[in-house]
Amino acid sequence: MKKQMKNKIFHGLAAFMLLPLMGACSQDAGEVMPQQPADQESTELVPVTLRFATEVADMSTRGELDGTETGSIGEGGMVDLLVFAIYDSEGTLLNYQVDGYKSLTINGRTIQAGTGQNIMKWEDAENGITLDFDLRKTYQIAAWAQSSKCNAYNTQDLRNVTVSYAGAVNNDESRDAFCKSLTFDGNVNELKVILRRPFAQINVGTTGADYKNNRLIPGGTYYDKSTVTLSGVATKMNVLTDVISSEGLVEATFSSATIPAYYNISSVPTDDDKLLQTEGEQFLQIHLETDSDSEDFLEYKTSYPTKDENGAYLTEEFKYLSMCYVLVPTATQENNTVLPNFKVTFHSYNNREDNSVALTNLPVRRNYRTNILGGLYYTDSNTPGGDGPGGGDNPGGGDGPDNPDDPDNPDEPIDDPTSLFNSVSLQLEIKCDYFNNYNRDINGEEIK
């Protein structure tokens, strides 16, 4: 792939989300044979077993040269319930509600299914449910899976799922969700419904060198919390038709929360060395060299340069600073769009001044990750001010490639940084990556 040195946008492939609920009793996993629906008076009924899976769980090759890795974030690990409904070929809701699945009690909540819907534990959905269908007719199924810990989505009618951003918290993995609609008939014995995210996931990360440099500048600090505000996000989706509405777009704020770097750590580090890098932290890992055949990522680097003099990347592991899921106004799975405004704000563990980065026209796409990366920077090791490869846009200069101002003192900051990300003149990489296929670009074309 041809490299560009500034304001690069790499198109590869991004992500999806959830619903609000209200329910009552659970049922043992396994197949269920309900009574014949009242509106199905046919003598040609046949049993069809419906089984459900998420796309990430169904991908046997996940992790092999995947463009982006975020560990357990984005794996759908918090999904624990499913809602589904059956419709006729014209989209009219049918009465396929089963007594045992009219409500669900889970994690201290009782969640009621909507009219004609079934709600069940996710393990029941994976094991399958068997229903009777008329051989002579065509049906549609719409399904939505999410975490019972999230109440931001109203799925009482899967033809009009609504998303609320009120009280949204940044870096919240419980907002992950999946959905799917399919057309089928009674000529199949078993139907596997593989659900995909309807949301985009937006990640923010920076190199360890940039993160450390921000701590070294006068008044600098490490950041352990982040907030996101963005505009142009959608609030409505018809799961049955797979259409996200472009009407009623809103501005949303995801309030301050611990950065995803510490997602798998019980407590946030309190000393500088461990804030810079600690055992068990989750990095935002991006394969930036698309022609590489290595499955490994270039390791986290806490000193400059993070690019060599030819522009090649020296690190592919980034301090994971922010993550959120948003519904984006695209009509179909194949379309991509931009968000007019995006702002991420970083907050420090020691109550130092906040730091923000604002972008316009951020590329996003449902079921894709958009990765915003800072700190990728080459420093000319010979000329102060940096007039070698990389040009005068590079702060600093000096005699040592790892620390251009003072190679004998690794705890001196590089020249002229003003804040996180700005220490590299805001030369951001923005890379969109599909969750499960690194070999396709943002338009779905195979990468040669």
Image (cartoon, rainbow, N blue to C red):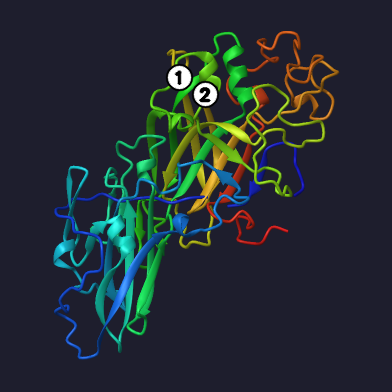
Compared with 223, 71 (above or below) is below
Q: Amino acid at mark 2?
A: Thr
196 lies left or right of 105: right
Is residue 88 visible in this depiction of the protein? Answer: yes
**Figure quadrant of residue 172:** top left
Q: Amino acid at mark 1?
A: Pro
Density class for disc 2 (Cα within 10 Å; few <14, some 14-19, many ≥20) is some
184 lies left or right of 204: left
Q: Is 245 in front, or is 158?
A: 158
Q: Which mark is residue 269?
A: 1
Label 1, secondary structure: give it. loop
Mark with earlier residue (2, 1): 1
Residue 51 position, x and y percent, is: 34, 67
- Asked if marks 2 and 1 touch (Cβ < 8 Å), the reply is yes
Q: Which mark is residue 278?
A: 2
Residue 81 position, x and y percent, is: 28, 54
255 lies left or right of 151: right
Compared with 421, 18 (above or below) is below
Q: Residue at x 51, y 41 (%)?
A: 70
Is residue 422 visible in this depiction of the protein? Answer: no
Q: Residue at x 76, y 12 (%)?
A: 407
Label 2, secondary structure: give it. loop
Quadrant placement of the C terminus: bottom right
Q: Residue at x 30, y 53 (%)?
A: 162
Q: Residue at x 74, y 26 (%)?
A: 393
Instruction: Tell me the distance, in whole angstroms, between the alpha carbons under discs 2 and 1.
Output: 8 Å
